[in-house]
Image (cartoon, helix red, strand yellow):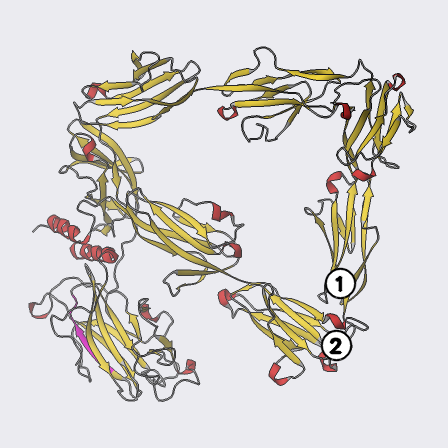
Amino acid sequence: MNMELLWILLFSVIHPYARGQGVYAPANAQIVHSGQACVVKEDNISERIYTIREGDTLVLQCLVKGHPRPQVRWTKTAGSASDKFQETSIFNETLRIERIQRVQGGRYYCKAENGVGVAAIKSIRVDVQYLDKPVLTVHQTISDVRGSYYQEKTVFLRCTVNSNPPARFIWKRGNTPIEQSKDNGVDIYEPLYTQGETKVLKLKNLRPQDFANYTCQVSVRNVCDIPDSSVTFQLTNATSPPALRLSVNETLVVDPGRDVTLSCEVTAGNPTPAVSWSRYPGPLPQRAQIRGGTLTLRAVTSADSGYYNCTAVNNVGNPAKRNVNLIVRVMRNLTFQITPDSNKDSESIQMGRDLKISCHVDAQPQDKVNYTWYKNGVPVVPSDSLVFLRSDPDMVPGTSSLEIIDMKFRDQATYSCVAGFPGSSVPELRVDVNITQSSVTPPTLTVPTGGGVVTVLEGAWADLVCLVDGKPRPPVLWSRADKDLPMPSGEWLVETRDGRLRLTNVTRDMTGTYRCQTAPYNGLNIKRREAQVQLNVQFAPIVDPPFSDVRSPTNQPVTLRCAVLKANPPRITRASWLMNGRPLRPEALNTQDAPTLRIERLGAASNGTYECRISNGVGISSCIFNVSTRAYNPEFYYDTPNPISILKDNNYSYILQWTQKEPKAVDRIIGYWINVRQNKRVVFSRQIDVNEPEPGVLMYYTLTDLRIPLSYEVRLTAITMFGVGDPATRAIHYSEPYTYPRPTDHVCGFEDDRICGFTQDRSDVFDWTRQNHLTQNPKRTANTGPDTDRSGTKEGYYMYIEASRPRAKGDVARLLSPLYNVTTSRGPSGSSRVPYCISFYYHMKGMHIGSLNVLLRMKGIATVDKQVWSCSGNQGPEWRQANVLVTPTGPFQVVFEGVRGNSYEGDIAIDDVSITAGKCKQDSPVPNTAVLPAGAPPRHAQSLAALLPAALTSWLLLHR
């Protein structure tokens, strides 16, 4: 069997996608991290928890397999509702968050999709750790607030902090921790219904020694290297809560342009309170100046109006607060209304009937506006026939009216309304209304001839016109009539003085009916006049498909169809076909069917770009068809396990793998053209022959003589009997292939925290522990476990399993050696296997000793654990040596498995482990009585899919 055939067979066995499954859904998604994690662990439902300190950088990478290459999307849940990332997605394999904040903690999902099968989803919970500075406040029972604040009283010191994980509290008086059990005068408890974490120190009936410095120290036990934090408060017999006094009234009205000074004076409080200013709504103005308790605002405007809050805090009792409502005078938009006698349903001025003239101005403060009425320039004197209403109850608040009772000829005049703030520098506003029978006529609203329907092209501008007449002529208000939608400007009503509404850059969404109506102000206050204008926006046809890639075998018929989804006007006036820009034939007008074109026999002459142009007299739209007998592009496979092998002369090889997109869509594919470039220079170019590709079946080719450490660009093109197809390009980058460590004569005494590359098995119940005599727990269980390491020194380390609680009978801890590489070579006496010696010392003292097992974990197509040594029960107080001979057939690991016995006197330890090639130099003092007989079934096997990379690497190393 030649080497190439061996590779194909092995690949068929270990790669589940080689036969008909090269195209496969995303699978085996993993989330790995490269940021500033404190710890990454598994919780009780096997979800990964990524712990990170607030302010550090979070980096998560989603590793997923799939072909075609999946698209990765990140989403987040279980976080703050205000977190913007929750509402969006990030399309990238790597998620990076700089200076992460606590609200960004939660569950992050990595979702990978490639259009094949179901998506692969993996989640990780990000736990952001933080510790704020604690806040200490002092309180007294409400019933005791009288007289001297802290004389013969009960005092509560409340310490609150926000943290994750929950903080631990320590109270100190001076430098001495306070213990409730040793001081009857104090009580420490956690109150209910508090925000954050809180601990209260209660001082009962103050004693002289209670006047001291109190410190609240909080700690999260140095997780993520977060240091402890503390706050100190000095309690004296002068301690008192804050009190404030304002320099101005609670409501302050000023003219614009003035400087405003607000002073907040502290009248009581020990320690000295800290004074701060804030504003509602919004922040303080940018030009605001604060000095102590004084706030200065320069050249105020109406935008500076609001509630200004002065707060004094000294952490004693409740904060003292004072508020100032600052109002900056403003006056704008003075309007009038003429109301005929409403009791007579009149719409015009008539002698002998009542008439009301109303005047309104938008002002702040509204109730401080003063209205003055004039008749022909002379102030109006109230009488039986002229009634002045400062605030008309029939109008909007702040409206002044002048009623003319039983109108006479002498009442015809020019009336003026003047609005102003008395004693203010704000300019007055004035409006004049001419009241005569000839100067006041009801309004009319009409649409000009031909203006009821306005037709425009999309993207142009349109004028909607409603002609208004009347004396005085009122403004015209525009709104949408047939939809519950705002106007294109975003407003619900748009005012126009002359009734003309201009819309620019109109779109098809603006199509509809628009309502125009007279305004109820600056004219007669009567029933509104209304009219409607229809806006018709014309646009070019919307066609389907806008673009289509059509592939077909040679000499086969092809039908192209272009459908019209929507158009205005809907009537199609012309449809024509072009090939490569050359007209073919026009379609009949007014056709109700989608324009079609049939190519009877597709060949080299009929390959090209076909365009169907459809017009409705307004615009032209096109369906584009790329018709070809060319093969689709190949789709590279990116999940090849360990594709790189090192060759001689500083060269390397690369296994290129791909599938063919829709190979049955065109003529039979007979081969591929491979072109390799390095720095735009062709270094390799050749044609390779293949059998007819099947959908989804992986194909491969090994590129050799690539120079270390150069990168290359590979272009791959399918070849049919009638020509080449579309190319696909990818980059190849050199990376060091993984090589397994080899057994050596080195003896591992576990003297550093890297423990010689040994790792804890994540599928067991608990872990082995590294320890020496100096790190032993003084309260450890007696009569079990070693006192020192095998050498007898107090500084020497060893690994052991702790049998005390919470361990239970049968709990298992496994310690895994590094993965050792073994090549197939001749052993002694012509054997094809090389023997290896596993040598170690073990300590098994105690009346409840369980078992110590040594397993050989073989790495191949599947992972198999085989027990090669075992020992159970009490073996005495001495360290004992064991030598175990094994003959692995490939890469392997040594597993030390400790099994907990019946109770807590069952500690088991190992030390001085070595794995060397060749036979053991001496026999083990303890026979390997528990070695499994030949042919015994394996104790454990992992899934084939999880071991593909290791298995494939093993084969490459053995046959390179």
Q: Residue furthest top?
A: 449
Say if 924 sits above or below 693 in the image.
below
Q: Is residue 866 left or right of residue 784?
A: left
Q: Nearer the viewer, residue 157 or 946?
A: 157
Q: Which residue does the numbered mark 2 point to in the structure image?
A: 153
User: Where does the image place residue 499, in percent across and percent down from the top left?
Assistant: 65, 19
Q: Is residue 33 visible?
A: no
- Residue placed at 71% from the left, 79% from the top? 210
Side (left or right) of 8 relative to 398: left
Residue at disc 2, secondary structure = loop
Q: Residue at x 13, y 38 (%)?
A: 691
Q: Is residue 756 above or below residue 438?
A: below
| Quarter of the image where one finds residue 114 | top left
Q: Is residue 594 magenta?
A: no
Question: Which residue corresponds to mark 1?
Answer: 273
Q: Is residue 66 visible?
A: yes
Type of the residue with mark 1? Pro
Q: Quadrant of residue 557?
A: top left
Magenta span: helix, strand or loop, mainly? strand
- Among numbered discs 1 and 2, the one appearing first in the sequence: 2
Q: What span is colored magenta in the figure?
A: 881-888
Look at 72% across and 80% down and name the residue there: 205
| Left or right, residue 440 beside residue 83 | right
Residue at image location 61% in from the left, 12% down from the top: 448
Q: Amino acid at mark 2?
A: Lys
